[in-house]
Image (cartoon, helix red, strand yellow):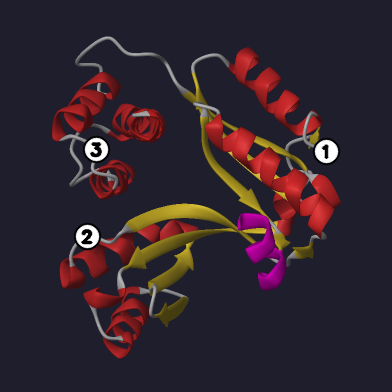
Amino acid sequence: MYRKGAQDKKRAKVFGKLGRELQVAAKEGGSDPDSNPRLRAAIVAARNANMPKDNIERAIKKGAGESDSGNFEAIRYEGFGPGGVALIVEVLTDNRNRTASEIRTAFSKNGGNMAETGAVSFMFDRIGEIRYPAAAASDEAMFEAALEAGAEDVVSSKDGHEIACAADDLHAVAGALTEKFGDPASAKLIWRPQSAVAVGESDAQTLFSLLDTLDDNDDVQTVSANFEIADEMMERLTA
């Protein structure tokens, strides 16, 4: 019973974050996914998380102003975690003072510190990322289609296909691939680190605590970081 309760709580948190993204996407670009690429990507993400159709439609209506809704705004926070790891935290919030305080506390209680906007983002590239399951296409077919659509890089493995493109080209590339292979598993803008910081075991434990705390925050949508941890150490820490 406890496990089911924990799973339900986790699912509710995921749905809450997806709902916010749906609302903001609909508010900024309208409720028609055919003419709103951000909303289309949000709908795909919600479906992949098994979010109920009624929840999706309700969130879109709220964002489009068809019903009462909170006024969420997108804010980016930057800072450093244990071991000098750079982090970018993207949030959607209806109370920036509350969120700023919570994010600052998460950093300070887990060996990190907040920094000014721009302090770490120069260490990352803003790119578009599209993911497909491995079964969507052969490696060769995905590679050829992605490059033809304007992608810059394609990495295929048994885990799936990962397509990278310029941020401004994301929705054009995703649209072309959707016509050929159907909806992707995800299509979004990400912060890709230009290089990685090796993290020792003691710093890694504190870093994971920071990442978990940020992930548990309802306002936090994504966290990007530039760390790498040896496979053997990761196995020990997650055992």
For disc 1, the neighbor class at 10 Å (few under 14, some 14 to 19, many from 20) is some
User: Between marks 1 and 3, how big is the CA–CA gap?
Assistant: 35 Å
Neighbor class of circle 3 (other Cα within 10 Å; few <14, some 14-19, many 20+) is some
- Main secondary structure of the magenta stretch: helix
Three-letter amino acid code of the residue under disc 2: Asp
- Which residue is located at x 31 percent, y 47 percent? 45
**Image-quadrant location for residue 69:** top left
The quadrant in which the N terminus is found is top left
Which label belongs to residue 27?
none
In the rendered image, residue 237 lying in the magenta stretch gets the answer: yes
Q: Position of residue 188 (x, y in %)?
A: 41, 53
Residue 149 x/y as whole percent: 32, 74
Specify the amino acid type for callout 1: Gly
Dot 2 falls on a residue whose secondary structure is loop
The answer to whether 212 is drawn above or below residue 108 in the figure is: below
Residue 208 placement (x, y as % from top left): 68, 46
Asked if 204 appears above or below 236 in the picture, the reply is above
- The residue carrying mark 2 is 183
Give the alpha-carbon distance from disc 2 to disc 1, as whole Å: 40 Å
| Residue 84 seen from this side | no
Q: Secondary structure at mark 1?
A: loop
Lateral position of residue 88 relative to residue 108, left or right: left
Question: Which quadrant of the figure has residue 168?
Answer: bottom left
Left or right? Give the position of 215 relative to 66.
right
Of the numbered discs in the image, which one, if any, rests on residue 51? Answer: 3
Answer left or right for 61 relative to 8.
left
Q: Which residue is mark 1?
A: 111
